[in-house]
Amino acid sequence: TDLGPLDILSEVVHAGGLARGMRVFQVQGVRGFQLAASQPRTLSFPASRLFIHCDCFPEEFSIIVTLRVLSIPAKRNEYVFTLMAEESPGMLVGLRYASNKLHFLFWSQEHTASWQTHVTFPNISLSDNQWHTLILAVSGKSFSLTVDCSTPKDKVMETPFPASLSVKRASFYLGNRRRRKGMFTGLLRQLVLLPGADATPRICTAMNFKVATLSVPTVLQDLPAKPASNEVLKYPYETDTKVTLGSRPPCTKQEKAQLWFNASQRGLYLCNGTAWISLLEVKKRLDYVEEYQNLATNSETMDVEVFTIPKVGLFAATANRYTPPGSAIYKWTDGKFVPYQNIPTYQAQSWKYFTIGKKIFLAVANFEQNDRGQEFSVIYKWSRRKEKFIAYQRITTHSARDWEAFVIEGEAFLAVVNHREGNNHNIDSVIYRWNPRTGLFETNQTIPTSGAYDWEFFTIGPYSFLAVANTFNGTSTKIYSHIYIWLSGSFQLFQSILTFGAADWEVFRIRDRVFLAVANSHSYDSGMPAPSNFYAIKSSIYELNITAQMFVKFQDLLTYSALDWEFFSVGDDSFLVVANSFDGFTFSVNSIIYRWQGYEGFVAAHHLPTVGCRDWEAFHTAEGSYLLYSSAKEPLSKVLKLKTT
């Protein structure tokens, strides 16, 4: 158990170069070996190279594999590696995969005589042209597979892995079983045997779990430094990059790492999987902000939701206070938002746009009862035939403030924030799960909240989190807001943070760092002396500390009854804009854009005059980048354009 990792891949890389039949290929910024099927025996080595002091395979071990699998026919099997006895065609140990299955094979003379034992893990989707890291942990009759550090899949077999599997006169074969049939056709980056331990805790610590590393051959590690003028790379590598000419092509996961040359503008662009990133042009920088459009709204606006319906266009939904006339949806037309649809709402507080498969939804959080004394919020569904949103499902809510939609392990959820019921602020907020059979949302879990305003869902690696902004418990705004983590099919408390009338959480990432900002609205406690100003209060930014496994305070910023944070980027620069709504004397308060300055944190860069600012939304069009703010004190929202240099 004191043995270190045994790097199988490194054994086929000779001091003078690669083995015959091996090439180094780089895809999505990650290197791997491509193996040729013509000479499988050249991709082998004696097991005695690894097992120097003992000629038995470990009884307990982990196998760590990082690979990129190409799409393969449904009935085809490909081998990642095998351990073969030289004097017989029998396979001692092997790992192979099909289109949606992974098989671990081993031979046990004690239990199965001449037959191999197959340990099959179904529903393992690897053939997506993406990098994946697999950890197979074996101990006796227990077999556990972890894919990309997600929840392990466990198997208990009748036949245990043999306690003394002899490897005398046996050889490892890389990507084959000593013949061409079943040859591995993808890319292989890591293949490690770790005796005596479950490698999962050692592997699952990085931010990029799909290419987590325990031991990788030197040739596959980071790109080498630029060689001297009289040198060449010791291990030349290839990439699958191609350059497209002409008009802007699509940029999806399939085109990731591809290049597009725009001849008309003489620009070279790289697809990052979602958007084309300029390689030759100078990165844009925010210079100043200018007023672009005054958007007249039905009444004061509590929230704006900006969204895009594919093949239809860009929209903005405003949550308006009064009924009639209700709330409005605007469509971006000829560079401006114009009225598109009116929807009856009852002191609407927020909208949430989300999709489930091909279905498109828009949920409104109603704060008050309707004309019949009924209190519910409504989910609307987009009708492709009418090109309108149509009422789809009503859900009973209690002074609802916010909806949050998210997906966990392929299942869709919708969480509502219930603010109060009558004068009672300490009530349950509800998480609903989508039932694909009935086509409706059904109650899944309730969570106690205190005058809550906002849900914020986010993921970190394989883990899912839900943060609630608790605002008022009936006597004080100085209360704890909570972060929950999804474990064993439900949300469980992860961390509590003291907040002051919390109105919003905003999660964002800067490079590999994860931040969580809270907007504190006011400080009030019925049992304490009144402060000089209830509304001039610090809002805080927290950063995830991986080692401590918790969010720790990173920075405090003075705000004035802050109700919202919005994170956005311009070029390589990151920004946070705060919705300051009231300074204790007037609703005409500057909201502020803060620029990320690295070691200095966020520094005020632009002061924007706003009136009762309630919400900020950042969005982009072909014409440029914009900010849209809603006013809770006048029937006028504003679109601001970000001017860049």
Image: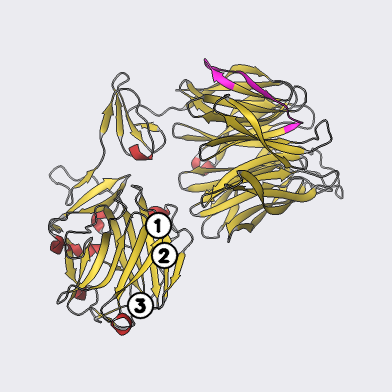
Instruction: Tell me residue 187's x, y (percent).
Output: 27, 52
- For disc 1, the neighbor class at 10 Å (few under 14, some 14 to 19, many from 20) is some
Query: Disc number at residue 161?
Result: 3
Instruction: Tell me residue 332's x, y (percent).
Output: 55, 20
Q: Amino acid at mark 3?
A: Phe
**Mark with earlier residue (3, 2):** 2
**Quadrant in the rendering for residue 441:** top right
Secondary structure of the residue carrying numbered label 3:
loop
Q: Along the line of sight, which residue is nearer the eye, 532 or 199?
A: 199
Q: Is residue 335 magenta?
A: yes
- Say which residue label 2 marks: 145
Query: Disc number at residue 124?
Result: 1
Secondary structure of the residue carrying numbered label 2:
strand
Q: Residue at x 13, y 57 (%)?
A: 20
* Image quadrant in which the C terminus is located: top left
**Quadrant in the rendering for residue 238:** top left
Instruction: Give the residues in magenta.
Output: 331-348
